[in-house]
Amino acid sequence: MPKRVVVAAVLFRPNRDFMSCSHDQSKKFSICPQCGQLVVPTTNPNYFELYGLNVRYHIDQEELQNRYYDLTRKLHPDKHQLLSSENLILATQWSAFANNAFLTLKDDDQRARYILSLGLVEQKTNQFSKRPLQLAEEYFELQEKIEDNSLSKEERIKIFENFSKKLKLTINSLENSKVNLFKEWEQKGAPINQTALRDLEKIRDEMDQHSYLVSLTADLGRKWGA
């Protein structure tokens, strides 16, 4: 099953002093010297925007980590305990948002799913639509042969091993295909709009099949000790 990407909601309710202050909005996540409030974005950024990154599947992980450390230092509750309770609440909320954003972007699969969610690509709920037809048919044949007592143990093991190898090759192929499809999308400028919907849906389908086969491999391991 694909991992769920949870987009955290950040509640920002600025007080009157904050709203009337003309602090520098470019210095986000810092304490305004005029009103004494934590300066945060007035609208919730997506995860890439939060870290000043372009929406891409291929990102610099070292750069992401450095920006994460820099942001968490600014938002650490210990830095805001001596200020207002509102600052402490804001820092805690944004810190949780930043942590979730970092964990999502750090993970290849979650980052890919998050990009699809930004592109408003709907997730398929029908599990049968995720099954590669040929492999699904071979899997059912495998079950019959494994349970066929007329075959020797060695024959059944051989059938099982051959199918497992085919599964692994297909999984690797789908993973490589996903990476290449993201490269092609990025070469087009990584658009997040209706023009990119077909490209993103194709990536979704590849990822869904990949997830299904990974789950199938785990199922085989549980049943027959792969």
Image (tube, rainbow, N blue to C red):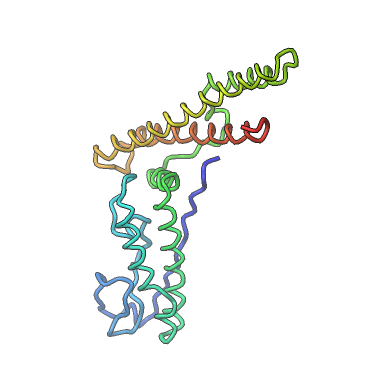
The residue under the point 31% across, 45% down is 58
The residue shown at (40%, 58%) is 102
Residue 83 position (above or below residue 152): below
Give coordinates of residue 140: x percent, y percent. Answer: 63, 20
- Quadrant in which the C terminus is drawn: top right
Q: Relative to 45, does residue 172 appear above or below in the rendering?
A: above
The image quadrant of residue 25 is bottom left
Residue 12 horizontal/vertical position (percent): 42, 70
Report the label total: 0
Which picture quadrant has residue 194?
A: top left
Q: Residue furthest bottom?
A: 82
201 sits left or right of 159 in the view: left
- Residue 146 point in image, percent of width and height: 68, 21
Residue most extreme to the right: 149
Horizontal side of 88 relative to 51 (left or right) equals right
**Along the viewing direction, whichever of 26 and 22 lies nearer the viewer:** 26
Residue at coordinates 55% horizontally, 40% vertically from top-left?
A: 1
Tell me the quarter of the picture where residue 191 sits: top left
Q: Could you tell me which residue is drawn at 37 percent across and 81 percent down?
A: 16
Instruction: Work out which residue is located at the far front of the displayed protein and give it.
Output: 154
> As drawn, is 63 to the left or to the right of 6?
left
In the rendered image, the vertical position of residue 25 relative to residue 114, given as above or below? below
On screen, residue 98 above or below 182 = below
